[in-house]
Image (tube, rainbow, N blue to C red):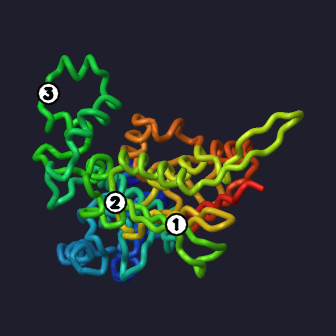
Amino acid sequence: MTDLADVLGDQESMVVEFKESANDGKKIGQAICALANDLCGRGGGDLLIGVDRHGRPLTEVRTFDSDLLKVTEHRDSGKILPRPSMTVEKATFKGQTIIRVQVEASTTPPVRYDGVVWVRPGPTTRKAHTEDERILAERRRAADGPFEGRPVPGSTLADLDLRLFQSTYLPSEVAPEVIEENGRPELLQLNSLRLADATGIPTVLGLLVLGYDPSAFIPGAYLQFVRFDGGDMAAGIIDEQELRVNVVDLTERLVALMKGHLHTRVVEQSGFRERPQPDYPISALREVCMNAVMHRNYETSNAPIRILWFADRIEVSNPGGPYGQVREDNFDRVNDYRNPSLAAAMKSLGYVNRFGRGISRIQAELGVNGNPQAEFNVDASSWSVTLRQAS
C-alpha cells in the first residue's frame, strides 16, 4: 500500500489535518466540515486519524470495521449540513495503520457543523469569519450560474416581445449578415443568446430585456418614480409612476419622464455669451439609472429601483450591495458583475458605454454642468446615489 506520508507529507496544512483519536466526535465533525468547505479551493482534503499533531503515527489506534463505521456515521448524522461527500478507509502512514477520511469539496458551500461554518485558512480548523462565508457563498452561486440565466417557471415565449427581439435586440448582438446567412429558428436564436432555455421557457435575462411585464415573474423588476414638492418625503407629491416594462422600453420612458421634470435656465458666460444649464445633466441621470438597472439584486429582493426627486436633490437607490470583488471601500475603483449577461446586453444596446466607467462619467458630467459631485452610500444590501441641484 502507498504510504500517505510520501503523498500528503507529515505536516498539517490547509488540506491535511491530523487527529489522534476518533473519540472526540465534535472535533472530527468540525474537521470534516472545514475540509468540505475547501476555503483554499484545492478540491477537498484528508483527515488522518491516528496521527498526532507532530505528524507521528500512534500504534494504539483502532481500525476495526466498527471504528471505520463510527467515523462514517458523521456523514449521515445530520450535524454536518449540507451532507458531505467522503470516504473512510484504512491506510498506511509512516508504516503504521491509521484511518483516512477523504473529504470532497462541497458543491453547495458553506457547510455547517451544528450550525457553525468551519474552515481551514491554514494548518488549523477555525470558525469562519464573515469574509470567509462571503467567499464560500459566492462560490456556490458561481457553480449554480448567474441568477439571470435561469429559466423562469410559469413564463412562456408569449411573455416576450418577440418583435422587439427581431427589430432591436438581435441586430445589437449579431451582425446582420450572420442573421441572414444562418436562418436559425427563433427559439434557437433565443436560446443561443440565453434569453430562453431549449424548451422555450424564458430566462430571467429574457424577461428583463424583452418581457412585456418582467415584474409579473420577477417581483422587484420595476422602477418607482416619485417627484416631491419640497425637500423631504413629508412634502406633497407632484408626480408618481411605476414603470413595469423591459429594459428597452424603460430607457425610452424614463428619459422622457425625467426630461419632463427638468428645469433649464440660461447662465451667462464670458462676454455676451450665454448657455442653457439644466438642474441636472440628463446624461448623468441616465447613467445613474442604467447602472441601478444593471447592478441591482433581482434574486432575493422584491424592492424596486427608486427615484425620489426632491426640490434640491435626486436620490436613486437599488437593492443589492457590493458583489464579488467590490467592497464598500473600493466600489469607485473595482468592478464586478452580479448580472454579467444583462450588463453585456445593455452595453450591446448602447445603454452603458464602457464597463467600469460609470462613476467617473457621472462625476465628470455633473462637474461640467456645475453640480456638486454625486454622493454614494453603499451598505451590505443596497446602493444609493444622491445628485444635488446645480447652483
First reached walking from the N terminus: tag 1 or tag 2? 2
Q: CA distance from mark 2 to mark 3?
A: 31 Å
Q: Amino acid at mark 1?
A: Ser
227 displayed left or right of 372: left
Q: Please report contact status of discs 2 and 3: CB closer than 8 Å, yes or no.
A: no
First reached walking from the N terminus: tag 3 or tag 1? 3
Q: Which residue is mark 1?
A: 382
Q: Amino acid at mark 3?
A: Arg
The crowd level at tag 1 (other Cα within 10 Å; few <14, some 14-19, many 20+) is some
Residue 302 appears in the figure: yes
Q: Which residue is mark 2?
A: 244
Mark 2 lies on a secondary structure that is loop
Res 184 label: 3
300 displayed left or right of 269: left
Q: Residue at x 33, y 55 (%)?
A: 245
Q: Residue at x 48, y 70 (%)?
A: 125
Percent position (x, y) of residue 305? Answer: 46, 63
First reached walking from the N terminus: tag 2 or tag 3? 3
Question: Image quadrant for the C terminus?
Answer: bottom right
Percent position (x, y) of residue 6? Answer: 40, 48
Q: Amino acid at mark 2?
A: Arg
Mark 3 lies on a secondary structure that is loop
